[in-house]
Image (spheres, helix red, strand yellow):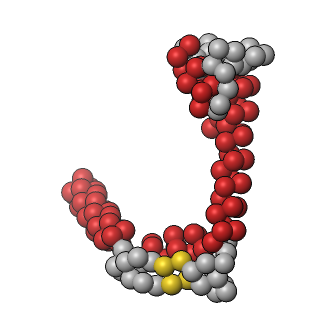
């Protein structure tokens, strides 16, 4: 909720009319009358809370749908079945697998990231040694 408050307090004078209309349309309200009570900060905070609720509901729905299915890694063919002991959901199991799948493009990105981080550490140490000499 803190990030919500930060966003809301950033616009302490209220949004522009075009922003207010866009927010109203995003949440399915009438842009001519939203917010009816006039407190737009309260309305935005409530809307964000509703969005978070909807996201949680949809994630639970996806988990339920996937609970009786097999989920496959399209890069290496690894298959997670509905009866295996998996994390919270099949989607989480696949997400975890992708992080370490050697055939997935994300593996090459992770390796490159690690290589670059090591080079930065090396150069930072070299600079520190040069500075102290």
Does residue 38 appear left or right of residue 96 in this picture?
right
Q: Quadrant of the N terminus?
A: top right
On the image, which quarter does residue 83 sit in? Answer: bottom right
Closer-to-camera residue (5/17): 17
Q: Count the marks: how many? A: 0
Closer-to-camera residue (117/97): 97
**Residue shown at 45% from the left, 72% from the top:** 99
Establish if 72 lies above or below 3.
Answer: below
Most extreme residue toward the right, as rendered?
A: 37
**Residue shown at 66% from the left, 55% from the top:** 58
Q: Position of residue 44 (x, y in %)?
A: 67, 28
Q: Is residue 114 visible?
A: no
**Residue shown at 60% from the left, 27% from the top:** 25
Does residue 131 appear left or right of residue 88 in this picture?
left
Q: Position of residue 128 (x, y in %)?
A: 28, 56
On the image, which quarter does residue 23 sit in? Answer: top right
Does residue 95 appear left or right of residue 102 in this picture?
right
Q: Is residue 57 visible?
A: yes
Q: Quadrant of the C terminus?
A: bottom left
Closer-to-camera residue (22/95): 22
Does residue 39 appear left or right of residue 24 in this picture?
right
């Amino acid at each position: 909720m803190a990030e919500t408050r930060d966003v809301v307090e950033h616009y302490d004078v209220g949004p522009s009319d075009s922003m207010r209309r866009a927010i109203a349309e995003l949440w399915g309200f009438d842009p001519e009358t939203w917010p009816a009570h006039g407190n737009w900060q309260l309305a935005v905070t409530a809307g964000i809370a509703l969005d978070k609720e909807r996201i949680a509901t949809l994630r639970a729905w996806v988990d339920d749908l996937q609970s009786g299915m097999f989920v496959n890694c399209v890069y290496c063919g690894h298959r997670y079945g509905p009866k295996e002991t998996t994390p919270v959901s099949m989607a989480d199991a696949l997400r975890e697998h992708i992080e370490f799948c050697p055939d997935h493009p994300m593996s090459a990105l992770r390796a490159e990231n690690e290589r670059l981080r090591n080079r930065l550490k090396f150069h930072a140490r070299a600079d520190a040694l040069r500075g102290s000499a």
